[in-house]
Amino acid sequence: MQITESDIKKMVEQALQQLVQNNQAAAGQASDISLENGVFATVDEAAAAARAAWEKLRKLPLAARRNMIDKMREVSRKHAKELAELAVMETKLGRVDDKIAKILLAANKTPGVEDLMSTAYSGDDGLTLVEYAPIGVFGSITPSTNPAATVINNSISLIAAGNTVVYNPHPSAARVSIRTMQLLNLAITSAGGPENTLTSVASPNLKTSAEVMNHPNVNALVVTGGGPVVKAAMAVGKKVIAAGPGNPPVVVDETAIISKAAADIVKGASFDNNILCTAEKEVFVVEKVANALKTEMVKNGAFEVKGSQLEKLLATVLTKKNDKFYPNRDFIGKDASVILQAAGIQAGQDVKLIIAETTKDHPLVMTEMLMPVLPIVRVANVDQAIELAVIAEKGNRHTAIMHSQNITNLTKMAQEIQATIFVKNGPSVAGLGFESEGFTTLTIAGPTGEGLTSAKTFTRQRRCVLVDGLRIL
């Protein structure tokens, strides 16, 4: 089917409308942001400034980029608490302590220029060198769920790669996203880098999102958001690195160390109130250990609802439109105690996570809720658990978790689920390098295939060939 320009425009408008449902109120909150340190009144101005900055950045040595990134890490660590508090205050999502942890994770474990390892091919016919070059100016659409951490992570990666950026933050996280960007810009210039290496409009909205995506000065896009905005970006016709939605399943078989599995699941599913797209969203547990798992989860801060309490919970956290269920946006990213109180259920303020046994095709299982509400499904055996996990993951190829001591079962799960991140015997946050090995990213490009993004992701390969020379053997 031929896609026309009007089709593309319609897709962009529809997708971004869903992304910024609360746009008008959010734009009003951001309207007093000062036009300095990379902030401009229009996309044209922001894109022009980013282009001018790139012309300067591309002429600087790698050592200059290293210095810039060192300063960016330093300022991110220094302002982690401020940015975390601002994020929770502005977006009403998540928990301050967990946002501090995410910001520090992005600051400390996002790879820099060390990710850009050149490759040399030497032989009888000469020497070939392959290097990773900048693409130019990136347009970056960032989310409300991880605003400061995503801006830090994207900025370090993109600048390490030699690019500049035009940001269009989610309107409901405009203030914290722009504050983060401005701090990073100050760090860059303090290290001798160009002004306006990172830019944004003061009042990001539906219109500016489309303008950034389509702007002639923007060479490529990085999009961290839901499915519709990813589709809209891919319809523009530029290179897109896109992180889409997930619905990560957890499988627990009879060989799992249940006390550890329970603690890990509660830790991962309750982290920042479950708004990470990598977080545990549903559990499939073998019947033999299901009761023990629930008991241990309660010991670790979970609260189980059943019967009439479950009905109250469902009426609170789910909405229905055109025979399809959606999470109630009023409770996305809210504390478990807040959700329980709204549902009229008595529980302590220290509850981290709400758990409930459901059927395999329950709306809680098949809907990415983005709140600390976790359905648990009993299954006859591990094969059924893996089969149902694949169905619940919906082909997003995002994240999956399994608790097992059986190598054969772990291998089967990995092969069947085809996830970008597969965490074995740990909390989901381990997949992002949190208290685990490996680098960190907040942009997991499953839809476009890059996987966990780093500086190398935002480059293009360039090959330099010298024939019949420079081989020293």
Image (cartoon, grey):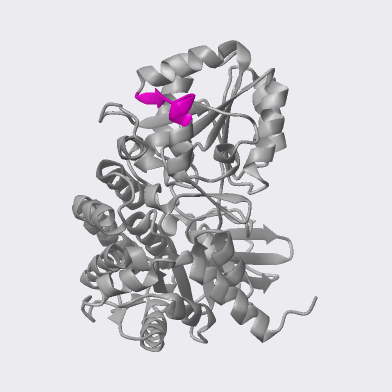
Residue 168: percent from left, percent from top: 41, 72
In the image, 17 versus 155, the foreground residue is 17
Residue 53: percent from left, percent from top: 36, 81
In the image, 186 versus 380, the foreground residue is 380
Quarter of the image for residue 237 reads bottom right
**Residue 59 in view here:** yes
Residue 299: percent from left, percent from top: 36, 17
State the residue at coordinates (60%, 53%).
446
Q: Which residues are magenta?
A: 301-310
Residue 309 in magenta stretch: yes
Quarter of the image for residue 386 reads top right
Residue 146 in magenta stretch: no
Say if 458 sits above or below 92 in the image: below
Quarter of the image for residue 11 reads bottom right
Residue 431 appears left or right of 194? right
State the residue at coordinates (56%, 43%).
247
Residue 1: percent from left, percent from top: 80, 75
Quadrant, the C terminus: bottom right
**Residue projecting furthest to the front:** 308
**Residue 197 in view here:** no
Say if 172 sits above or below 247 in the image: below
Say if 429 sits above or below 456 in the image: above
